[in-house]
Amino acid sequence: MISKSTPIVIVGGGAFGLSTALHLSQDGYSNIAVFEQDDQVPPRFSAANDLNKIVRAEYEDPFYTDLTMQAIAAWKTPLFAPHFHQTGFLHCVSGKASERAVATLKRFQTSAIRHPELHSHVIPLDGENAIREQFWQYDGQFPGWKGYFNRFDGYAHSANALAAVYRETQKAGVRFFLGTQGAVTEVVYEKGQSIGIRTKNGHFHAAGLVIVAAGAAAGKLVPAIGTQVVAKSWSVAHVHLTDEETSALRGIPVTYARDLGFFFEPDPVTQLLKLCPMGGGYVNTDPTTGLSQAPDSLAASAFMPAADEAQIRRLLAQTLPRLAHRPLVQKSLCWFADTSDSDFIIDYVPNTASSVILLSGDSGHGFKMFPLVGRWVKDLLEAPDAQQPVARWRWKQPTSGEAKWGGDVSWRLGATREFRDVKPGQSKL
Ligand SMILES: Cc1cc2nc3c(=O)[nH]c(=O)nc-3n(C[C@H](O)[C@H](O)[C@H](O)COP(=O)(O)OP(=O)(O)OC[C@H]3O[C@@H](n4cnc5c(N)ncnc54)[C@H](O)[C@@H]3O)c2cc1C
C-alpha cells in the first residue's frame, strides 16, 4: 500500500483521470500530478469534452444499475448538481426496429420497472399516441414507437462537469501539466517497476505510482493490454437552433430510439441540439499489429459517416420533422476505450510490482459514473491484498488472435466497421 505522500502521476485529464484526482486529493493523497496532452481542460481529445452525456440509471445488468443509482445520488451533490439535468429519458424502439433492439429495450424497461427506487418514476408508453400525449414539444408522428419514460434519468453537461472538477482539484493542490509538458510518451520502468513517466518535451517525472487514464489511447502507454482494450468511436453531430427554437425545446427528455439513435435537450449557451446514431461504431485497426488506435489528429475524425447521417435524419423526421433537413454541424467521431464485455478495467498492470494502474475500458458508458470513478481507484489502492475487489474490473490477459469488437454487447446494434472504410472520399457505401 502506498503512503499518502507518495508522488502519484495520473496520465489523462479526461473523465476518469479527473475523477481520480478528485477522490484521491479529497482522501488526503497530497502529491498528485495530472498529465494531459491537450493544452486545455476539458481536453479536446477527451470523449467527455462534450455538451451532454446520458445519465440513465437502468442497465440490463443490476451491478451497473446499482452503481448508477449511487452515481446519480452523487450527481445531486453541490459540486456536480449544476451539471446534472434530470429531464427524464424517453427510451423506445421505432416501428421498424429489429427483434434484437426490441428485446434489449424490454430488458432495460424491466430493469427500471422492477427496481424499488425507480419503478415509481417509470411510465410505459405503448404506441405513438401515448408518446405524443406526453411530450407536447414534439410534432413528429413517432411511427410505431413504443417503450417507456423514466423521470429519474437525464443527462450531464460533461464538459462543464470536467471543468468544475478541474477547478476543484487545482484548489486541492493537484498539479496539472498540459500540452507538450503533459503529453506522456512512455511509462518508465526500472527493474520491473515503474519509476515515473517521460513527456513529449523530454522531461522525466518521478512517481511512486502511475495511473494511466488515457481513454482510447490506453494501449499506447500500456501495450500489455493488447486486444483487451479497443479504440472505438461513435459519431455525433448537431443542429444549430435559433434562440426561439432552443427555448421552445427546453425540458425535452433525452430521446432515444434504440434502432435510430438519440438526442438531447438543446444546450442553451451554444443552441446546439446534439444527436448520436450509436450503432456498432468504428475501429481503426493497424494492419500490422491488429490493434485499433484512435487517429492522432482530431481533424481526421471531424466528419459523420453518410449512413449515420441518414439515420439521425430519420430520427429527426420521426420526432422533430421541422429539423430533419437542417444542416448538421460540428460532426465528429468520438473515440472511447471499448472492452469485449463492456466492463471497465481498474487494476494494477501485471509485472509492475503494483506501480502502474490501468483505468480504462469505459466502453462508451462511463461518464455517468464520473462522480464515483476515483473512489474505485482509491478502493483498489487500499485493498489489503492489492487485488481489485470487483472481479469483473480485474486485468484480463489479452487473447491471441483477432480483437473482439464488442459485437456481443446487447445494447449496441449493427456491425462495427473500419474507420478507413467510412472516411470521407473513401466510403464503400
Ligand atoms: C459518442 C460518445 C457518446 C458517449 N455517450 C455517453 C453517455 O451518453 N453516457 C455515458 O455515461 N458515457 C458516454 N460516453 C462515454 C464517456 O465519454 C467515457 O466513458 C469517458 O469519457 C471515459 O473517460 P476516460 O477518462 O477514460 O477517457 P477520456 O475522457 O477520453 O479522457 C482521456 C484523456 O487522456 C488524454 N491522453 C491520452 N493519451 C495521453 C498521453 N499519452 N498523455 C497525456 N494525456 C493523454 C486524452 O487527451 C484525454 O483527455 C460516450 C462516449 C462517446 C465517444
Image (cartoon, helix red, strand yellow):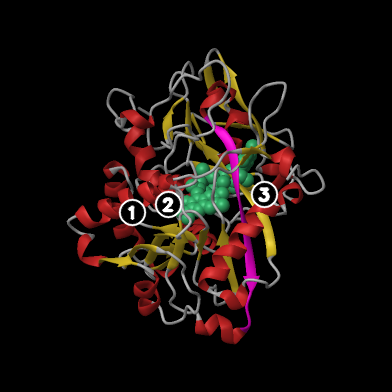
Within 10 angstroms of label 1, few (less than 14), some, or many (20 or more) residues?
A: many
Mark 2 within 8 Å of ligand 1, using the beta carbon: yes
Crowding around mark 2 (Cα neighbors within 10 Å: few <14, some 14 to 19, many 20+) is: many
Give the CA separation, mark 2 to mark 1.
Answer: 8 Å
Highlighted magenta segment, given as a residue range = 229-242
Q: Position of residue 186 (x, y in %)?
A: 64, 28
Who is closer to the viewer here, 110 or 383?
A: 110
In the structure shown, which secondary structural element does the residue marked by tag 2 occupy? loop
Q: Name the residue beneath numbered marker 1.
A: 71
User: Where does the image place residue 192, in percent across and percent down from the top left?
Assistant: 53, 14
Q: Amino acid at mark 2?
A: Phe
Say whether marks 2 and 1 touch (CB < 8 Å).
yes
* Nearer to us: label 3 or label 2: 2
The reply to whether dot 3 and dot 1 touch (C-beta < 8 Å) is no
**Side of 405 where 290 appears, left or right:** right
Image x and y of residue 152, in percent: 30, 65
Is residue 241 magenta-colored? yes
Q: Is residue 36 left or right of residue 146?
A: right
**Mark 3 to mark 1: distance in Å?**
27 Å
| Rendered view: 334 above or below 354 | below
What residue type is disc 3 on? Asp
Q: In which quadrant of the rendered view does residue 112 lie?
A: bottom left
Marks 3 and 2, Cα distance to the nearest angstrom? 20 Å
